[in-house]
Image (spheres, rainbow, N blue to C red):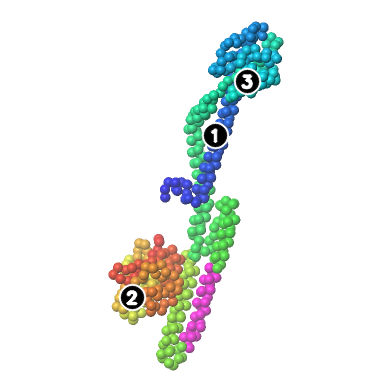
Amino acid sequence: MNVITSVFGNKRSLRRGLIVNVIIALLLCLLIAGIILVKEFYEHLEENLDAALLNEATEVIGQIDPDAAFYGLNPDALRFQGVNGAYRYTVFDGSGAVVVGGETSEAIQAQIVTIALGQPMRISLPGVRVGIGLKAKVKERDVYVLVSTYPQGEDATAIQEIIHEIEEELGWVVLGVIIVLASALLATQRALIPIQNLSDQAERIGPAAANQRLKTDQVPTEIAPLIKSVNAAFDRLEDGYQAQRDFASNVAHEIRTPIAVLRSSVERISDPTIKATLEQDVLRLDQMFGQLINLARADAAIKSSFSEVDLHDIAVDVASDAVQAALGQGRSLSVTGTAQATVKGHSGLLTVALSNLVSNALAYAPVGSEIEIEVLANPAGFRVLDRGPGVPDDLKPLLFERFNRGAQTNTNSTGSGIGLAIVKSVAKSHGAVVDIADREGGGSAFSFSFDG
């Protein structure tokens, strides 16, 4: 997991989605703030320009003498005739006629005469020039002053000033962005804690804890209806699962009485050949329903009923029960490995699982070979090793499925296909894992290991 994934979450995670949305919102806010900043800057720039023009106009008014020629001003001065200075001035009399200066346009004069006393007004000028007109009363006579300027290069200067301002505040901007992102990460992390708790709760729900449900007391109100719907679905699944287990268990138990009656009827048959054949059929039928009972018990196993058991003792008991049948088939049994391996589990179900593994090994091991039960300590568990034909790799994942008899490895197999499924079910109820591996020198090694 790289740094980006650890901080922002996986590609399609809710955490990454929330953080990305926060970042988009932050960028949008920065964009809007930038637009407002530029707009405000230009507004202040215009205000400053108007103030500068007004100051110039006020200064010129202070120099006017209506009784003197050209109002006491020098008409040949650069500021009245030139276009290269920072400002250009034009003075009008009370009728709007030009006294001194070069702004002689009738359109300008028409605007000038509309200026109210003491109220500066923007004057529309040809080209890009901007101007401010001001009316004053000097010696009881109305005079107008127009001050204009050429703002060429002003945009570039303004941009430079904006960049300068941003550079001065860049540190604070970066700090603000970091604080916002850190706050977003923290808020997202805290907001996802209830969802993570729900995920942990969901992982604990299973066949051995089917009655557990997701808690809604600490989840956001927007998610609570979803959790209630999920819990309702769990209720329906538990009911269906319980009905399935009850059906299998009830059928397996109820069938025992007809089987007993059938066995009694077979014993009264006089023909020894037919009798022997039917007895074998009844025996297999009885074994199959016995396996169904064990399977139902394994599926219904509850961890609250588990206790401390020693796997070595179970291995010895299973070997003792199976040794007579093994010797009768020309095979032998041995128990190896650690002398003590204590786990928390159901002694009866673990015995059934190991017995099924041993029975499977006896069915496939060649005459004269030995089946070894190895008790493991770290991790705790057991292995059953045989010298049979082995299991093809493509069949290994399927061998623990229900009603799979491994026909590809032994076409003479007459098993029910439930025995190894029971082993898998017992392992699942105990939090253990089952596996098949090739044994060195030939044969198979069936392992049943606790995760700890």
Give how far apart the Cα atoms at labels 2 and 1 are: 82 Å
Residue visible at 43% across and 46% down? 3
Q: Assign a secondary structure to mark 2.
A: loop
* Amino acid on which the number 2 mark rests in the picture: Ala
Of residues 362 and 39, the one nearer the viewer is 39
Which residue in the structure is indicated by mark 2? 365
Q: Position of residue 279 (x, y in %)?
A: 43, 85
Q: Is residue 78 above or below residue 46?
A: above
Q: For the magenta stretch, what is the residue range?
A: 241-265
Categorize mark 3 by other alpha carbons within 10 Å: few (<14), some (14-19), many (20+). Answer: many
Q: Amino acid at mark 3?
A: Ile
- Amino acid of disc 1: Gly
* 295 is within the stretch colored magenta: no
The numbered mark, 3 or 1, whose residue comes first in the sequence reads: 1
- In percent of width and height, residue 376 lies at 35, 65
The residue to which callout 1 is attached is 34
- Is most of the magenta stretch helix, strand or loop? helix
Sequence order check, earlier mark of 2 and 1:
1
